[in-house]
Amino acid sequence: APEPDEPAELEMSDNTGVVDDHGGHGGHGADDNGSTADEDDVRQHLTEPMEVERNHSGEEYVAREVLVAATRSEISQTRTRGFEIVSSVDLGGEDRQVARLLTPADLSVEQSIDYLRGVMPTGIVTINNAYRSSQVRARRTNQHAPSAQPLLPNALVGVIDTGASIHNGDRTVLRTRGFGSAGYAPREHGSAVVAIVSRFGAHAQVADVFGPSRAGQPYASASAIIAAMRWMVETGVPVINISIEGPRNPILESIVAEAARNGHVIVAAAGNGGPLAHPAYPGAYDGVVAVTAVDASGRAYLRANRGEYIS
């Protein structure tokens, strides 16, 4: 697991459309949740650090939340059973959304999923997976990195990661947006990825999807990554890099697949779980370019994932 980075002060951001939502959960807030008590419950949930639990398969997820992809009316109807809409993201021109729902007090996450699948036969209902950064601490740095070939003028790369440092006068980063509970917070890994983008002469659009858990570890929820993906697609970013690894999530998979079908190039981390690790997502999804690590001699990194999804 990556060591948590301390959030840094934001040096510069356009703050356009900044989402001060818990866990990146991104999208439109639930401003019409009904009663004041419901609003207070959602507000408290948003302001607390992310509570991460594990299911029977060992997958980490955001406690008290379920993630649904359904029509607006189907999502709205869940309120009658005591679900609270924390946030939602529109899916293109269709009458469909991805929404984070806070579970009723008398239903567990598992029971909530079973109930919602029964009343949403055409929707997708799942846990709101919690993902970790693919960052590892290198023992040393290769001081002789290969030279980068400049890309086309004004090339744009989307970076879904931690926030990246922005220095005065540096126009590499064109737009930033925070989807985590900490907002947009520059940290080591996002800054390193943007530095690579800069070496190729390209520009970056950066989405910070990480927020702190109760244990102090940085996590990105599936809903945060989905909201960031929608932002990248809606703003026409052609290449999207995701340095995140975790379990398979059916809603995230559908969002990634749609972006790939529409011509976006999706690049993601292959994972650092070791040779016997399960496939890491979103890198292992069909249509995604999974990038692994090698040492100075071109040999695969000792802890790098192996698998058919890595060429």
Image (spheres, rainbow, N blue to C red):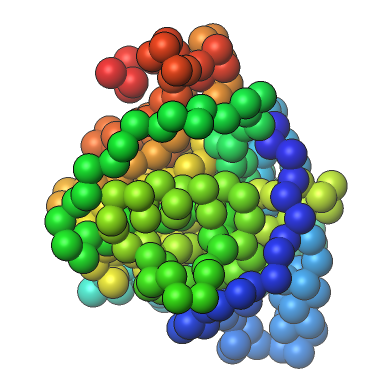
Observer able to see residue 258: no
Observer able to see residue 244: yes
Query: Which residue appears at 28% of the width and 70% of the height?
Result: 234
Q: Position of residue 124 (x, y in %)?
A: 42, 51
Q: Can you tell which quarter of the image residue 230 is in? A: bottom left
Tell how many labels: 0
Task: Report the quarter where the N terminus lies.
Answer: top right
Seen in the image, is 175 located left or right of residue 183? Answer: left
Q: Can you tell which quarter of the image residue 293 is in? A: top left
Comparing 204 with 171, the one in front is 171
Comparing 98 with 79, the one in front is 98
Comparing 239 with 196, the one in front is 196
| Residue at the limit of the structure toward the right, as seen here | 215
Seen in the image, is 262 located left or right of residue 138? Answer: left
Q: Position of residue 149 (x, y in %)?
A: 22, 43
| Residue at the limit of the structure toward the front, as seen here | 144
Seen in the image, is 280 located left or right of residue 78? Answer: left
Query: Which residue appears at 37% of the width and 44% of the height?
Result: 253
Task: Report the quarter where the C terminus lies.
Answer: top left
Q: Position of residue 247 (x, y in %)?
A: 53, 34
Query: Which residue appears at 51% of the width and 28% of the height?
Result: 142
Query: Which residue appears at 57% of the width and 30% of the height?
Result: 141
Is 44 above or below relative to 122? Answer: below
Is 97 above or below relative to 17? Answer: above
